[in-house]
Amino acid sequence: MLGLQQDSSEMNKKAAMSGFESIMWVPKGILVAAALLILTIVFGMFVIDTVDVKSIHSMVFANHLLYDKNGVAYFDEGIKRVYPGIIDLDKFSTAVVETNIVMATSTLLAAKATLNSKESLYYKERQYGQWFPRRSIAGQGGSQEFLISKNVADSLFNSGTALFSILTPNTAK
Amino acid sequence: MFLKQKKGAEKQFYMMAELLFAAVVILAFFFFVSSKISDTTLEKNYVARDIALLMEAIYAAPGQLEYTYPVGYDFSIRIAASGITVWDDKGNAHYWYSHDNAVVHEPGEFVFAFKGNKKEIKFIKKNEQLLITCSGCSRTALK
């Protein structure tokens, strides 16, 4: 009788232990999942899979406007010669630039070029007005401004400065 | 005695299950790391951006120009007015450039599929025409 009682109490203990161990698997699983998630996030933070070329692209775009004969560079039709750095005042207009230089995706870059702080041309004028950073708050809705200054001359050989303000939205990668 | 033996076996079972669980977690993490290492997203993004910047630089260059661009990877590259798309069997990357409307691309829109040792794209700008050819690749015109 006493032996049977001992067996029964040991069985109860065993059942309780088994239940306890099963319950302990839940926090263990949660802990391992959390550790795995943290490791994946930390690892992901160090994985670089893109290259930020926004500033380089802004510079190249300014050069494209300035040196391309279909941009604002002076072009002598008679001898078919382009004069890099010499701006044709007749071509220094929003309409000419937007006709000749086309972006299939219009939501990636907008620009304003000012010649000698007087004449201005816009590339994607509406976007430029919308994107212009009014407050320096970082985030998806904002944009980054790149200022590029170039020494130029106009077609009358008056030297001066062309200032490019190029905006790229923060969402463009 | 019998109960003690059973309890021992149960502890062993739990220990084995824990080890198995840990092995599965470690293996899953190694597979994740391995997939990231063999991933070519950075290379594709790099090539797409590099060619896009090159296209704008070519437009900006006054006069005639001949330039050979070494690709270096077994990628397929689509050069179109809408941008540069680079892809392989693992995925694709796209980057844009501002297209010069007056420059005619020969032969228009096309895909270069690179495979082999010599992987190059040759850009020849002459008389408002931009001829784009390749070596070490097959070329498919889309338009």
Image: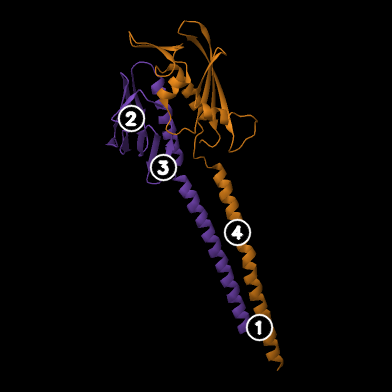
Chain colours: A orange, B purple
C-alpha gap between disc 3 and disc 4: 33 Å
Question: Do the CB atoms of the residues marked 3 and 1 lie less than 8 Å apart?
Answer: no
**Amino acid on which disc 1 is placed:** Met
Q: In which quarter of the image is residue A4?
A: bottom right
Q: Residue at x 47, y 24 (%)?
A: A61
Instruction: State the separation of the CA atoms marked 4 and 1.
Output: 31 Å
Say if residue A55 shows up in the picture. Answer: no
Which numbered disc flags the more N-terminal residue, 3 or 2?
3
Q: Are marks 3 and 4 on the same chain?
A: no
In this rendered view, identify the residue nearer to me: A37 or A107. A107
The residue labelled by disc 3 is B92
Compared to A163, does A131 lie above or below? below
Q: What residue type is labelled 2?
A: Ile
Residue annotated with mark 4: A32
A143 relative position to B113: left or right: right
Residue identifier under label 2: B121
- Front: mark 2 or 4: 2
* Chain of the residue where label 4 is placed in the rendered structure: A
The mark found on residue A11 in the picture is: 1
